[in-house]
Amino acid sequence: MERTFLMIKPDGVQRSLVGEVIRRYEAKGFTLVGLKLMAVSRELAEKHYDVHKDKPFFGGLVEFITSGPVVAMVWEGEGIVASARKIIGATNPLTAEPGTIRGDYGVTIGRNLIHGSDAVETARNEIALWFSEDELAAWEPTMKGWLYE
């Protein structure tokens, strides 16, 4: 079963949107297998955004993600990486479709509420960076038979 990494950024936590984000993924039928509220260290932030280290906005990303608590999550389900990105919406909330998290709640690109892995391989790497294997729960929801053939 495919997994993805999602993170509610400090602005989403401060705006009390944690429950709303979780509700959307649960309603879609995905399974939450890892969850933690945490302060992000500078070291972890720099590793997470390493792909952007040579870009001018790298410092701002690191500063923002370490500015307050985040909610780190691992979700599981068929096609979860692509589906999670659709639920999140475009990076820029001004172009995100209504009905997406960013389209409904986002205001600016610098405060776009949530991060989601962009590919299966990226998800594997991000999950390993943010969670140890013993922090992930292996369980099967009773509704699974109603979701998958």
Image (spheres, rainbow, N blue to C red):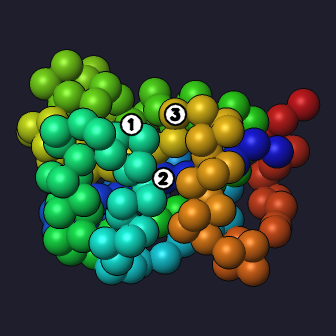
Give the vertical position of 31 relative to 42 (above or below). Answer: above
For label 3, the crowd category at 10 Å Cα-Cα, with few meaning under 14, some 14 to 19 and many 20 or more, is: some
Q: Where does the image place residue 51, in percent across and percent down from the top left?
A: 42, 41
Kindly report the distance in space between the C-alpha atoms of the residues bearing marks 2 and 1.
10 Å
Which secondary structure lies at badge 2?
strand
The quarter holding residue 133 reads: bottom right
Asked if one can make out residue 12 in the rendered structure from this viewpoint, the answer is no
* Callouts 2 and 1 close, C-beta under 8 Å: yes
Question: Residue drawn 23% across and 47% down?
Answer: 58
The residue under label 3 is which amino acid type?
Answer: Asp
Label 2 vs 1, first from the N-terminus: 2
The residue under label 1 is which amino acid type?
Answer: Ile
Q: Quick one: quadrant of the N terminus?
A: top right
Which secondary structure lies at badge 1?
helix
Q: Viewer-proximal residue, 19 or 136? A: 136
Task: Give the mark toward the camera: 2 or 1.
Answer: 2
Q: Where does the image place residue 124, in percent across and percent down from the top left?
A: 68, 49
Label 3 vs 2, first from the N-terminus: 2
The residue under label 2 is which amino acid type?
Answer: Leu
- The disc placed on residue 88 is 1
Residue receiving disc 3: 118
* Callouts 3 and 1 close, C-beta under 8 Å: no
Asked if one can make out residue 8 in the rendered structure from this viewpoint, the answer is yes
Q: Where does the image place residue 5, in percent across and percent down from the top left?
A: 55, 52
For label 1, the crowd category at 10 Å Cα-Cα, with few meaning under 14, some 14 to 19 and many 20 or more, is: many
Which secondary structure lies at badge 3?
loop
For label 2, the crowd category at 10 Å Cα-Cα, with few meaning under 14, some 14 to 19 and many 20 or more, is: many
Is 137 on the left-hand or right-hand side of 127? right
Residue receiving disc 2: 6
Give the vertical position of 142 relative to 108 (above or below). Answer: below
The quarter holding residue 64 reads: bottom left
Give the vertical position of 53 relative to 39 (above or below). Answer: above
